[in-house]
Amino acid sequence: MSKSDENTSLIIGAVEGFPVNSSLIVDLKRLIESTKNRVISSANAELVLMYWKIGERIQEEILRNKRADYGEKIVATLSQHLTEEYGKGFTKSSIARMLQFYKSFPEIKIVATLSQQLTWSHFVEVLTLRPDLKRNFYAEMCRIEQWSVRKLREKIDGMLYERTAIAKEPEEVARRELETLRKDDVLTPTLILKDPYLLDFLELTDAYSEKDLESAILREIEKFILELGSDFSFLSRQKRISIGNEDYYLDLLFYNRALRCLIAIELKLGKFKAADKGQMELYLRWLDKYEKKLGEEMPLGIVLCSDKNQEQVELLELAQNGIHVAEFMTQLPAPEIFEQKLHKAIAYAKARLEGNGK
């Protein structure tokens, strides 16, 4: 390095003739920014815990008094006193929300963990969600994937919970899944895989081919990955699979970092057929033998189709072979029809599982 280069990299200025090392400035800026971020995070966590403790204390007081209207009256009285002392932030609706916060998240350990990532605005978004499994799903996924409040709202509006496989599990199984996520920060396929997938952003017309669908996905690959979920990376299109003297072509190949496995995706415009299972099994076994790296899990397959017979899918026991069949929608129905369809599918799946004693 020449003397002039050395001066450029080490000296960024001088005050009254005293040189300043550039790395010193960079280090100090980094220290200041990281400290500011920790202070903000700590202040948020303390604020959230304060709101929780306020809710806890009010609930204790309500339980001591047996009068039916006591809760509403004490909230109004507290609002008046606290607003006079501390200003805005303690309106009747705000205090009622703190009380609801305590009731919705009664375990302070869980709140303390969530508050490291979720702001009070995040909690406000999920407080009214029912059942509690749905509320806890969004809270934990928000923590793991670090969603902004806006992103959380988008996920709720897009009915992510109802479209995720965990919503179709028996309640006890779903609770265990969420508990594992809470304790170990481990995402499982039931927390990632969806049905249906919403591909309205592709803006396809009524008449299109599988090739058109694939091309549209690649044009909008970033949006497609967002719909798939976090930690998906695109690897290949029309992945060549040679077996003996025959060549096959897998539509799309992804990798999921959270699951630590390859994800094979096949696109089917028509109804899912039993033969599609054999095709995907062949692809997954080839990927397992020739593409899977040391330390990775078995590859998983997603068959995206425009329609399916749910009973046929269940009889084929696809999950045992790492295959997930899901519908895709390029045009969304009216919100109320979409919601009705999802709730009907959830009820059907749960009834079938519980009937089978799972």
Image (cartoon, rainbow, N blue to C red):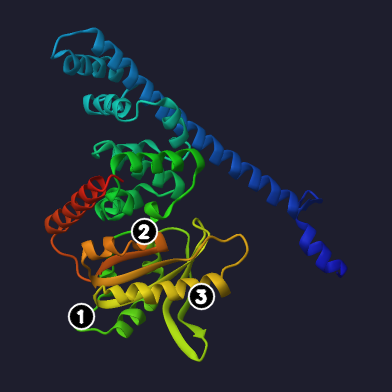
Residue 220 can be seen in this image: no
Name which of mark 2 and mark 1 comes first in the sequence: 2
Is 74 left or right of 24, judged from the image as shown? left
| Residue that appears at 43% across and 31% down | 110
Foreground label between 2 and 1: 2
Identify the residue position indicated by label 2 in the image: 193
Marks 3 and 2 sit apart, C-alpha to C-alpha, by 22 Å
Q: Residue furthest bottom?
A: 245
Return the x and y of residue 338 as percentages of the image width and height: 16, 58
Marks 1 and 3 sit apart, C-alpha to C-alpha, by 35 Å
Name which of mark 1 and mark 3 comes first in the sequence: 1
Identify the secondary structure beneath mark 1.
loop
Identify the residue position indicated by label 3 in the image: 286
The correct choice, above or below, for 168 with respect to 104 in the image is below
Foreground label between 1 and 3: 3
- Along the line of sight, which residue is nearer the eye, 187 or 42? 187
- State the count of labels: 3
Marks 2 and 1 sit apart, C-alpha to C-alpha, by 26 Å
Q: Amino acid at mark 3?
A: Trp
Foreground label between 3 and 2: 3
Identify the secondary structure beneath mark 3.
helix
Identify the residue position indicated by label 1 in the image: 205
